[in-house]
Image: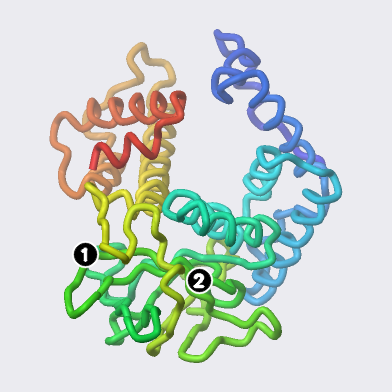
Amino acid sequence: MEGVDHLAHERNKSEFDVDAMKIVWAGSPHAFDVSDRISKLVASDPGFRKDNRSTLSRKELFKNTLRKAAYAWKTIVDLRLSEEEAAKLRFYVDEPAFTDLHWGMFIPAIKGQGTEEQQQKWLPLAYKMQIIGCYAQTELGHGSNVQGLETTATFDPQTDEFIIHSPTLTSSKWWPGGLGKVATHAIAYARLIVGGREHGVNGFIVQLRSLEDHSPLLGITVGDIGMKFGNGAYNTMDNGVLRFDHVRIPRNQMLMRCAQYTCLCMPSDAKLILEPCILIRFWTSTAVCICVYCSHVMVLGRGSRLLGPWGGKTDFVYSQWSAVCGGPVGANGKVVLVVVVVLVVAAIRRGRMAAAIVGFL
C-alpha cells in the first residue's frame, strides 16, 4: 500500500540530523530498527489497510477488526516474531481492538499482581490466546472512581470461594474494551468482604464465557454497549456491560501478590493493586496533552524565536491540561506541562514509569 510523504518538504528544511533524531526518539539503534522494520511490514501489507475505516458501518468495523486481529496473529506466528516485534506490529495496526486490553491490561495485571503460581497457570493460556481477557474496573455509576466501586467479592469459608456480585444497577461494569463480544475472562475489581468486614478493592480473575461455545456462564450477564459517538474510532472496539449474580470463583483466583486471604496480608500501599489502571490512565491523559500542546507549538512557532506570541492563544491547550490536572493550572501552566513532559521522558528512558507513577500518587 503506497503512501505519500507529506512531510518530506518540511524535513528537508530541518537544521538537525533527522536520522539521528529518529534513533534518539526510538531510544536506541535496536529499537529504531525494530520499529522501522515492523512499520514498513504493516504499511506494505494490504491486509492491514485502514483508508476505508470511516466509510464502514459499526457491524462492518467490528468484523474488520476481528479479521485484522486474526490476520495479525497469523502474521506473528508465521514470521515467528519476538514479543518485542509482535508488540510493535499490534501498535502499527493502529485500530482499537479487544487485543489492546488483552495485551495491555489483562496480561500486565496478572504479571504485576499475580503470584508466581497464578502467573504459571494463566499467562501461558493468555500468551497463546487460548483465553482472551479484559479489564473490568469501570462501573456505570462511578467511572474510574475506584473508591466508589460497588461490586462485591464476599468470601465463603464453607466452600473456600469468593462470591462476586453486582448489588445495584450502578455497580454494572460499563465500557471495558473486549468485554462486549470477545473476552472469555476478566480481571474484575470488587470490594473484598471477609467475615462481614470490608478490606478494600482487589482484583479477581473471573471466567465470563464458556471455552466450548462462548456462551455466558451461570450468573453472568454480558453484552455490547452499542454504537459510540462518531464513526470509526472506538466503534471498532466491543466495549461492554457486565453484571454478576452471585458468581462463585475459587479462592486462588483473587490476585494475591499484594494481598491474600489466609491472614489477609494487605500491602503497605494498596495503590499498588491498581498499577495497571494507573499506568494506562496516565499514559492516555499525558499523551493527549503532549500531542495537543506540541501541535499548538508547531503552529505558533513558525517565524518566531521563542515559538511565537503566546498571549491568549493557548486557551484550548490549557483547558485540556486543566482537565487532566483536575482544576485550573493558573499562570504557571506552561511550566507545569513542560516539567511533566520532561519527567515522563526521563521515566520512560529509565524504565521506571510504573514505579514513578505509583510513587507520585
Per the rendering, the mark at residue 147 is 1
Left or right of 276, for residue 211? right
Q: Nearer the viewer, residue 114 or 314?
A: 114
Within 10 Å of disc 1 (Cα), the crowding (few <14, some 14-19, many 20+) is few
Residue at position x 49%, y 75% from top? 240
Element under disc 2: loop
Q: How far is mark 2 from mark 1, CA to CA? A: 22 Å
Q: Which residue is mark 2?
A: 239
As drawn, 160 above or below 47: below
Left or right of 134, for residue 164? left
Q: Amino acid at mark 1?
A: Gln
Q: Position of residue 94 (x, y in %)?
A: 63, 50
Residue at position x 32%, y 58% from top? 259
Q: Nearer the viewer, residue 308 or 207?
A: 207
Single out the mark in the foreground, 2 or 1.
Answer: 1
Position of the C terminus by quadrant: top left
As drawn, 16 above or below 128: above
Q: Position of residue 9 (x, y in %)?
A: 65, 21
Q: Amino acid at mark 2?
A: Asn
Q: Earlier in the sequence, mark 2 or mark 1?
A: 1
Element under disc 1: helix
Residue at position x 64%, y 67% from top? 131
Tag count: 2
Residue 231: tell me if it is visible.
no
Residue 1 occupies which quadrant of the picture? top right
Q: Nearer the viewer, residue 271 or 250?
A: 250
What sort of colour scheme is used for the picture?
rainbow
Within 10 Å of disc 2 (Cα), the crowding (few <14, some 14-19, many 20+) is many
Left or right of 129, for residue 123? left
Residue 11 occupies which quadrant of the picture? top right
Q: Position of residue 98 (x, y in %)?
A: 59, 64
